[in-house]
Image (cartoon, coloured by chain):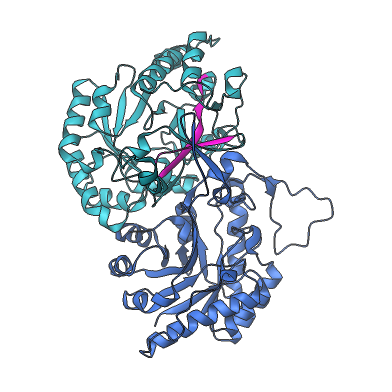
Chain colours: A cyan, B blue
């Protein structure tokens, strides 16, 4: 069994919002990238608003031998749909390997108007049940990111019922919600920082021991989901598609965390999973608020179910690494 | 003819809403709706409420808008034949899988995609129509022009929730509270079986967000004060933005936009306040149908704010 798992391929992917960040990123340890920011049309040079940038981004990824995916908005309104269709046209013309869909209306558009495009279902599509998976498969879904609230046990039950590949966040800040409104705009005058620069600041909302990260119209966990010591469990459960969420992170975070997981996944199927302490040093440096396991173990999202002392968290006492 | 759909968290609230002029009332069935402060009806209360609605020539709808775990789902589906036998054939659901499963099993059912399903566009509404929904609830944050465009989608009834709390995070897209606390609650009792013996172990259901049916889990984390930091630097103390949306003055615009149902949020409202709220919207709707200008343009009293989600 160990040998079978060790030769099986897995996919390590991430998300990148714009051409600037794509060019600044060392993607050697990734297999695939989702292009675009799902939260806001005004996010700086969002791939989802710039067809030429998107074409270029897809070609850059292809030249690097990466699978190129295009994401889509989590909560669109009617006036987004023209732009959504233009983005899908580019994705189809440039033969993106899949589109990530968080919104059911966009799923219908892809199904009806771009039937050749494979669909990966994103976390905001709220897949909670096996019957939900069946519905989405009927609309062309070939991979599912279940809602982040699902435990690994629940995910296993869905996989057993539906036999559909799941994509799981293994590291990074977990999305907790999406809004129509960016409250950061209230601070443009006071702080002298304008959109689109506001949401690219390192902005955390703190209350006692809790912290969440604001990315403008999105709220993400303050702690980084970290499944590093639990990779053997994920592989044993049959999972092979793993997301490192870096949408709001620095290029250094993006590349260094990926290097850790690339190395770790290569050994996670060994009889004894020996963890390199260098991995944890890197993870700790980048986890400014601390680590959690999300909802994977049936606990509150900010809890950690492993044994690593790093998980206790530092709550913003570690200096930021983003330049 | 556009209809007014009112909430009710108790039998008394059902009577109040009907007497105030609601064309239909929606209630939650205990254990299967997003309850908490909103109030849910026991089976016996549901039977009595439905009888009252029928006598009044109106309709009662049932919110089954939790997302039960797989082993709980069969118990949910077991409630359906009894509800149909009672004469209740409109259910409000919150999950595409449950909607599709109910559609397959119970052909006579009318299924409404809850506001928690997150529909905001023509494409969203078309999706739910294709899935088998008879109606879809849109948030009152959509303006009349958006509703007009959406009402053009054939084959599905468009409901607009004109009285609701507009929270920072979109309804159905928030799991902030369960990031902090995941709060199991007891499994609901079966309405058609005798009450559980004292001390009987009903087991715990794992709950989470309000989307999932986390009863009492939404402790309004978004309405507690937060400190905003940029890196290490404190920048501000704040609440997340939220407001009570009450579009009674714009009823005519939504009628003209083609909405089929005007829906009110407020299963947590006490009957006396609910009655006043429903009467205000009833008067507005009747005035529109008679071509009259809205007589009372005063803002809705803060007491009508929906609380305790």
Coordinates of residue B308 in the picture (x, y in percent): 62, 59
Question: Residue at 28% across / 58% down in the picture?
Answer: A78
Q: Name the quadrant containing residue B157.
A: bottom left
Coordinates of residue B221 in the picture (x, y in percent): 58, 47
Q: Is residue A276 visible?
A: no
Q: Name the quadrant containing residue A27.
A: top left
Q: Nearer the viewer, residue B108 or A303?
A: A303
Residue found farthest to the right: B198
Question: Residue at 70% across / 45% down in the picture?
Answer: B204
Q: Is residue B241 above or below residue B268?
A: above
Q: Is residue B186 above or below residue B249?
A: above
Q: Is A136 on the left or on the right of A53, as rendered?
A: right
Q: Is residue A160 visible?
A: yes
Q: Name the quadrant containing residue B179.
A: top right
Q: Is B202 on the left or on the right of A41, as rendered?
A: right
Q: Nearer the viewer, residue B142 or B230?
A: B230
Question: Residue at 30% across / 16% down in the picture?
Answer: A28
Question: Residue at 52% across / 77% down in the picture?
Answer: B24
* Magenta-colored segment: predominant secondary structure: strand
Coordinates of residue A85 in the picture (x, y in percent): 21, 49
**Magenta stretch bounds:** A210-228
Coordinates of residue A295 in the picture (x, y in percent): 56, 35
Q: Looking at the rendering, in which quadrant would you find the C terminus of chain A?
A: top left
Q: Is residue A137 above or below residue B155?
A: above
Is A218 within the magenta?
A: yes
The mark total stands at 0
Is A107 within the magenta?
A: no
């Amino acid at each position: 069994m160990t040998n079978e798992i060790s030769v099986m391929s897995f996919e390590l992917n991430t998300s990148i919002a714009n051409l600037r960040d794509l060019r600044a990123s060392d993607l050697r340890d990734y297999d695939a990238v989702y292009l675009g920011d799902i939260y806001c049309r005004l996010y700086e040079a969002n791939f989802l608003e710039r067809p030429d940038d998107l074409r270029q981004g897809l070609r850059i990824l292809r030249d690097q031998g990466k699978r190129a995916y295009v994401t889509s908005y989590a909560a669109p309104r009617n006036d987004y749909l023209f732009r959504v269709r233009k983005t899908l046209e580019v994705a189809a013309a440039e033969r993106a390997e899949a589109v990530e869909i968080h919104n059911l209306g966009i799923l219908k558009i892809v199904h009806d108007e771009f039937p050749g495009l494979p669909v990966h279902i994103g976390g905001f599509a709220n897949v909670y049940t096996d019957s939900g998976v069946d519905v989405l498969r009927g609309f062309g879904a070939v991979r599912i990111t279940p809602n982040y609230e699902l435990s690994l046990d629940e995910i296993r039950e869905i996989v057993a019922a539906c036999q559909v590949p799941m994509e799981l966040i293994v590291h990074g800040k977990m999305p907790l919600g999406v809004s129509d409104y960016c409250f950061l705009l209230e601070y443009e005058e006071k702080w002298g920082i304008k959109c689109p620069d506001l949401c690219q600041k390192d902005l955390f909302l703190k209350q006692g021991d809790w912290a969440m990260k604001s990315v403008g119209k999105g709220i993400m966990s303050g702690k980084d989901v970290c499944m590093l010591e639990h990779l053997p469990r994920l592989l044993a459960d049959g999972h092979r598609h793993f997301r490192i969420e870096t949408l709001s992170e620095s290029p250094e975070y993006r590349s260094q965390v990926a290097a850790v997981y690339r190395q770790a996944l290569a050994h996670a199927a060994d009889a004894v999973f020996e963890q390199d302490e260098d991995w944890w040093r890197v993870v700790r440096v980048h986890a400014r608020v601390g680590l959690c396991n999300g909802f994977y173990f049936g606990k509150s999202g900010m809890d950690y179910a492993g044994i690593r002392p790093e998980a206790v968290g530092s709550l913003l006492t570690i200096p930021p690494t983003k330049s | 003819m556009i209809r007014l759909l009112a909430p009710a968290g108790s039998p008394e609230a059902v009577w109040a809403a009907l007497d105030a002029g609601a064309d239909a009332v929606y209630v939650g069935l205990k254990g299967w709706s997003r309850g908490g402060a909103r109030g849910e009806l026991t089976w016996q209360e549901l039977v009595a409420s439905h009888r009252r609605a029928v006598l009044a020539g109106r309709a009662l709808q049932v919110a089954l808008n939790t997302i039960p775990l797989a082993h709980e789902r069969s118990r949910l589906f077991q409630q359906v034949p009894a509800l149909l036998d009672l004469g209740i054939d409109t259910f409000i659901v919150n999950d595409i899988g449950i909607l599709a499963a109910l559609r397959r099993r119970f052909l006579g059912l009318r299924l409404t995609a809850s506001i928690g399903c997150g529909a905001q566009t023509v494409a969203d509404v078309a999706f739910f129509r294709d899935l088998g929904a008879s109606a879809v609830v849109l948030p009152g944050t959509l303006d009349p022009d958006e509703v007009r465009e959406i009402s053009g989608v054939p084959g599905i009834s468009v409901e607009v929730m004109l009285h609701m709390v507009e929270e920072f995070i979109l309804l159905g897209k928030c799991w902030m509270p369960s990031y902090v606390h995941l709060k199991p609650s007891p499994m609901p009792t079966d309405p058609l079986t005798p009450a559980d013996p004292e001390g009987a172990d009903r087991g715990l259901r794992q709950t989470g967000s309000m989307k999932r049916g986390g009863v009492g889990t939404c402790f309004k984390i978004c309405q507690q004060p937060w400190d905003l930091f940029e890196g290490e630097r404190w920048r501000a103390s704040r609440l997340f933005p939220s407001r009570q949306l009450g579009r009674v003055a714009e009823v005519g615009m939504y009628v003209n936009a083609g909405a089929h149902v005007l829906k009110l949020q407020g299963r947590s409202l006490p009957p006396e306040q609910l009655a006043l709220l429903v009467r205000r919207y009833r008067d507005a709707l009747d005035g529109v149908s008679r071509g009259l200008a809205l007589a009372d343009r005063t803002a809705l009293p803060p007491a009508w704010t929906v609380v305790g989600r």
